[in-house]
Image (tube, rainbow, N blue to C red):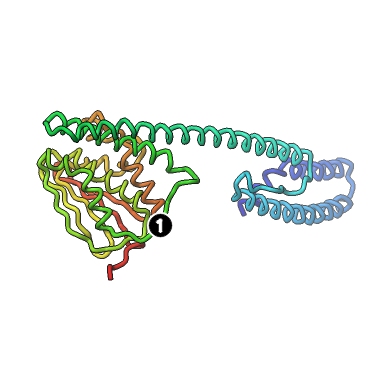
Amino acid sequence: MELFWSYIKQHRKGIIALVLFCAVFFVTFLLYHLPLKAVLYPSVLCIILGLVFVAIDFSRVKQKHKQLSEIKKLSAAMISSLPDIESVEDRDYQEIIKDLKTETARIETITSARYRDMVDYYTVWVHQIKTPIASMRLTLQNEDTPLSRKLSSDLFRIEQYVEMVLAFLRLDSVSSDYVFKEHSLDKIVKQAVAKFAQEFIDRKIHISYQPTEKTVITDDKWLSFVIEQVLSNALKYTRDGSIKIYMEEPKTLCIKDTGIGIAPEDMPRIFEKGYTGYNGRKDKKASGIGLYLCKRICKNLGVEISVSSKLDKGTTVRINLEQYIEKKE
């Protein structure tokens, strides 16, 4: 019905003109005292013919509208043909669309090339920067002083930020190396916890880990990245207390801390890129990228991540692995 009224509105000038012509005939016949039947009959006949024409034309317009509605669902690259040209306006519009399609394809090619160049550059940069990092770590391993331990902790943070850069660049890459295989969830968690062992010890934060005894069909590298980011945040915002890792049967890995928590007004936006919230404004080093990356990676892995928190009470991050968890035989 909306389409019909739009059609009537589009052709209102022609309808008004027809009514005016009929009115002119009626007035003329009245002024000359001619019988009205002489004009009434052809007027009714014209109206009937006009309605038939409108019905046929509206059917054509409806079919064309349906065809265009189907085309709207396609991407620009998939549009191979447009409805037949029936007017000068149709030809002009189709020429504009073709020009825009060509321009869009050209811009996409340029943008894609620039994106590949950027990813390639930063990938090389990440691998290059890892060499001096590894060298510094080997040097610090020969010392056991408060300063060396502090430098080792800072160096570990640098490694995390480097990995975060690489993960951010690879999120939208068509060549992302996701390899799904069966892995021990305990092994993935233990490897992630081991990376933070020194920080747990130095800051005297208790870690409680309950083995899950589960196997997971996932990409271990990317799932490890998510768990490490969650642990990093837990340590960052837990001044003292504990961090607990456990499984909520049958499907959810939980990482719970006793940190400063998240303000209620910040909760709806914690997964937004660049959003740091109240805690982030207090911690000037916060980037607002960690949880955003976790959300994106979990989506790519086909799992769900959620957060519950109480201010000054702590935060619990839940990673729902139901789709990929199997009981260990």
Between 324 and 128, the one lying in front of the other is 128
The quarter of the image holding the C terminus is bottom left
Residue 136 sits above or below residue 17 on the image: above
Q: How many marks?
A: 1
- Left or right of 312? Residue 172 is right
Question: Circle 1 sits in a helix, a strand or a loop, which is it?
Answer: loop
- Left or right of 13? Residue 274 is left
Which residue position is annotated with label 1?
Answer: 180
Residue 10 in the image: state x and y as whole percent: 69, 43
Between 312 and 238, the one lying in front of the other is 238
Residue 69 in the image: state x and y as whole percent: 63, 51
- Left or right of 268? Residue 92 is right
Q: Residue at x 33, y 46 (%)?
A: 294
The quarter of the image holding the N terminus is bottom right
Q: Residue at x 60, y 46 (%)?
A: 75
Q: Amino acid at mark 1?
A: Phe
Between 186 and 235, the one lying in front of the other is 186
Residue 318 in the image: state x and y as whole percent: 26, 53
Instruction: Assess disc 1: are there few (<14), some (14-19) or many (≥20) residues with their C-alpha within 10 Å of its C-alpha.
Output: few
